[in-house]
Image: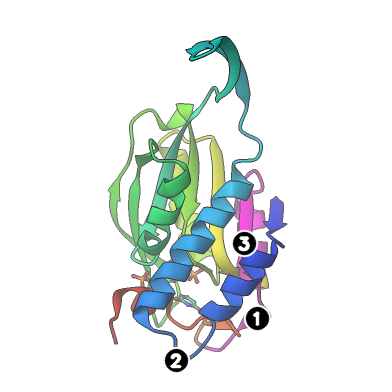
Amino acid sequence: MKLLQVKHPLVKHKIGLLRAADISTKQFRQLTAELASLLTYEATKDLLTETVSIETWSGAVEIEQIQGKKVTIVPILRAGLGMLDGVLELLPNARISVVGVYRDEATLQPVPYFQKLAANLEQRIAIVVDPMLATGGSMIATIDLLKQQGAKHIKALVLVAAPEGINALAQAHPDVELYTAATDRCLNEHGYILPGLGDAGDKLFGTK
Ligand SMILES: O=P(O)(O)OC[C@H]1O[C@H](OP(=O)(O)OP(=O)(O)O)[C@H](O)[C@@H]1O
Ligand SMILES: O=c1cc[nH]c(=O)[nH]1
Ligand SMILES: [Mg+2]
């Protein structure tokens, strides 16, 4: 599996701010969206362009346009919604495919509960977004579902990844590309990432 930890200074700075225990809901939301944009910039570096001729004020000019496959963004409910606006900022025409998966607190197993996917997934690059890759179960279940519906080209964007989740995802879906802002130490006995962010969904939605 291709794994890219984005080392840009802005990413390092913003992920650091996101870890503060006393962060406000507003700041958590804002940084999550900003980091999502920065990861999207990295994850779209290999999009192909083609040269086309357009009319400008000074005559015909050749410009480059993104060609080929269209994109669908796939936020995993709930916490993935916090990244959606940041991705849309750079890909404003992308279709959105929503997948609901929660992690059973006792078993840590993913429980899918919603899906509404864009059409023609086989013709699209799917960019799956979720701030946390812990055991990897939620991401793997989402990618299983996308592949069952025809998706062939999948990139996953996360803010914090645990080694356990990276290994599980690499085993289950070696063809997927994973972009992360940080790779953390390990999971605790409740399956939370250390040092991590805590519960990203609760922080984004102001629950608990
Ligand atoms: O890698 P995993 O072990 O599957 O854990 C990561 C998942 O857990 C969190 O979701 P959660 O179940 O808390 O749902 P929420 O987003 O609705 O809070 C997080 O947003 C991921 O989806
Ligand atoms: O550390 C973790 C693990 C799963 N889900 C979260 O929101 N945080
Ligand atoms: Mg949660």
The part of the image, by quadrant, that contains residue 207 is bottom left
Q: Position of residue 110 (x, y in %)?
A: 41, 66
Tell me if mark 2 has few (under 14), some (14-19) or many (20+) residues whose alpha carbon lies within 10 angstroms of its own: few
Check disc 1 and give the amino acid type.
Answer: Cys
Check disc 3 and give the amino acid type.
Answer: Thr
- Label 1 vs label 3: CA separation? 15 Å
Q: Residue at x 45, y 33 (%)?
A: 150
Give residue 22's mark: 2
Q: Position of residue 195 (x, y in %)?
A: 60, 85
Mark 3: C-beta under 8 Å from nearest atom of ligand 1: no
The secondary structure type at the circle numbered 3 is strand
Task: Name the front one of labels 1 and 3.
Answer: 3
N-terminal label among 1 and 3? 3
| Magenta region, residue range | 164-189
Q: Up-down: is 42 above or below 121?
A: below
Check disc 2 and give the amino acid type.
Answer: Asp
Q: In the rendered structure, does residue 122 fall within the stretch colored magenta?
A: no
Give residue 180's mark: 3
Q: Which residue is mark 1?
A: 186
N-terminal label among 2 and 1? 2
- Label 2 vs label 1: CA separation? 22 Å
Residue positioned most to the front: 58
Q: Residue at x 42, y 45 (%)?
A: 73
The part of the image, by quadrant, that contains residue 96 is top left
Q: Position of residue 205 (x, y in %)?
A: 30, 74
Task: Name the front one of labels 2 and 3.
Answer: 2
Q: Residue at x 35, y 79 (%)?
A: 25
